Image: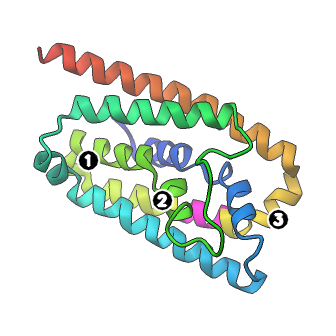
Amino acid sequence: MDVSFISAVVILLLVVDPVGNIPLFLSLLRGVDAARRARVIFRECMIALVVLLAFVVFGRWILALFGLSEPSLTIAGGVILFLIALRMIFRGPEGVFGDTPDGEPFIVPLAIPAIAGPAAIATVVLLVSRAPQRLPEWIGAVFVAMLVTLACLVFADRVAKLVGERGLLAFERLMGLILTAIAVEMLLRGIETFVRHL
């Protein structure tokens, strides 16, 4: 499957799901001073960016180090993405990522796994493994996705007031449905590639 730059950005945005993360960010940053919230969001987005870029650049070597094949990564990424998508559609009181620690969040759970989660990491590694000659494009796609994510989360309060809690929930469930389809496609492609190489 040939993935264009725009398609890569859209897939990354669906996986990272900045709008769906707005309730989580608002909840965890409620106790943080309003003047500091933007800096915390910027810091968490930068940490997530560094993590994703590390996997863009070194992902192939990490796969080789652990002896992982592309089909196994595709299937694993599909399974993880499918589970996250189901939790987005059927959200429980504990949220998508379960219980979260008290105090100002640092790295967990905002940068990882809310932004740079297993599905996002698997996605960037798959993009690079399928077309390593397009590495600058994939780096650019990660940067664009992170810029959009940063913008959404910095204006989280305004977005939440504009669309309301029900609007955010409906949008998150819609994203969950789309992610479910992407997850199933990843699983099917992984199984197809595995069977072809038997």
Q: Which amino acid does the dot numbered 2 rest on? A: Ile
Within 10 Å of disc 1 (Cα), the crowding (few <14, some 14-19, many 20+) is many
Is residue 1 among what the camera can see?
no
Quadrant where the C terminus is found in the figure: top left
Mark 1 and mark 3 residues within 8 Å of each other at the beta carbon = no
Q: Earlier in the sequence, mark 2 or mark 3?
A: 2
Disc 2 marks which residue? 112
CA distance for labels 2 and 1:
21 Å
Instruction: Give x and y (percent) for residue 191.
Output: 29, 18
Instruction: Give x and y (percent) for residue 40.
Output: 61, 77
Residue appearing at x 29%, y 24% in the figure: 190
CA distance for labels 1 and 3:
36 Å
- 72 sits to left or right of 83: left
Q: Height in image: 179 above or below 155?
A: above
Q: Which amino acid does the dot numbered 1 rest on? A: Val
Q: Height in image: 43 above or below 198?
A: below
Boundaries of the magenta span: 147-152
Q: Which amino acid does the dot numbered 3 rest on? A: Arg
Q: Height in image: 38 above or below 140?
A: below
- 130 sits to left or right of 102: left
